[in-house]
Image: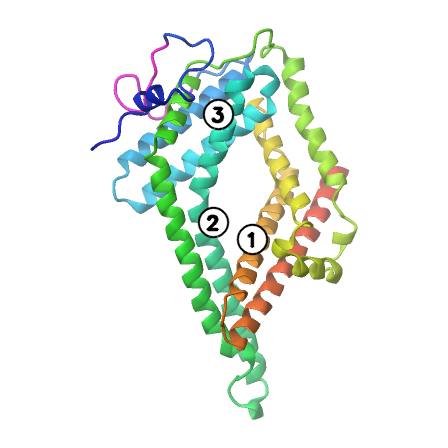
Amino acid sequence: MAPRPPEQTARAQGALVRAPGASGTTVPGTTGPGAAAPGATAPRSPGDPVTAYLQEQAGAFLRALRARRESGTSAPETEAAVHALRGAAQRVEATLHTFRPLLEAEWAERLHGELGWLSAVLGSEYACAHRLGRLLGALRRLRDEEGARSAAVPAQGPPEGPLPMGAARAGALLDRQLTLARNRAHSAALDALGSARFHAVADAVALLASEVPYRRGASPRDPEVVGALASLTSHRLADAIAALPLDRAGAPYNAEAAALGSAAPGGEPQDAPWHRVRSLLRLRVYAAEALGAAPEARTAPGARALDRHREAADAATAAAAAARTPRIAPPTAYALGVLHAVQRQEVEAARHTFQRVWREAVRV
């Protein structure tokens, strides 16, 4: 049985169906006569940038949803459409967060939470695939380096240490675990995109493309009010960066921090403040986008360093989880332990890069 269109499902559920004050509005779907044309964007209004940006991103969301439906069995086209869908969802979610005081509270809170759920579900599969590639690549480099060291001393013969012996089995174990996680994430994403919950979200975004519900008395056209809310994101980012141990990250590798990261599952709690800075930096970027400001080139290297930090921290967590697998051979556990330590070193290197480029950016 074919799923009902998003607007029908959402009306049946009664969740995220109509924006407050939008009674009697015809809901534009992603197909049919009411659909947004591919490539169309919401008209930009210099006096109302928040409305223009939200409607523009809502249109991008609907176009990506249509592209995914029309991609058929083409994996590259489907992946590109899902990436665009997630990007638009993240931008709408971030804008709702930044400018929430202007918006109808209950509606904004609910849609913000649902878009966060959707973004997490859609991103999980690709995160698993990237993590697996990162870990297997690191294992290959470790094995090659060990082999090169052994070859430099021919009398020792072929490499027989615990790292070369365990690397292949460690790679196979990681492949099994992360491929299983990726397959589960893929199934979860398919289930989510066919669920009534997603259809309700799509219906709410379709309504957002035609009307943004502001709270009574809000001033979305007042540049001082809008600018102050965007600046608040910058202040929060500055406070979060000030709380980071940037002096301890002054060296490319910090043994004390690496030991702390190895002792705690997932590197917590020391990773959490860095992840928060990454999230706040992204919020600031999207707030600037909403106001039509050009991206700050000086902060881009810091953002990339925090992306690498997150990837390395997640990879270290995956290696540690694999090492806790019951009844694995000692060489396999040893190889996974070395892999975990290497990823934690990458975490420290990313922190060093961030503190260096950020301090340079502040001085500019």
Q: Residues within 10 Å of mark 2 (few under 14, many from 20)?
A: some
Quarter occupied by the N terminus: top left
Tell me which segment is drawn in magenta: 25-41
Circle 2 residue: 127
Q: To which residue does mark 1 refer?
A: 314
Say which label, 1 or 3, has the lower sequence index: 3
Q: Between marks 2 and 1, how big is the CA–CA gap?
A: 9 Å
Badges 3 and 2: C-beta atoms under 8 Å apart? no
Residue at 68% in and 51% down: 351
Instruction: Residue at 47% x, 37% y: name it.
Output: 119
Q: For mark 3, what is the residue?
A: 111
Q: Was residue 233 drawn as part of the magenta stretch in this picture?
A: no
Q: Position of residue 320 (x, y in %)?
A: 56, 62
Count neighbours of disc 3 (C-alpha within 10 A) and say few if under 14, some if 14 to 19, many if 20 or more.
many
Three-letter code, disc 2: Ala
Indicate which label's residue lies in the foreground, 3 or 2: 3
Residue visible at 39% across and 38% down?
Answer: 82
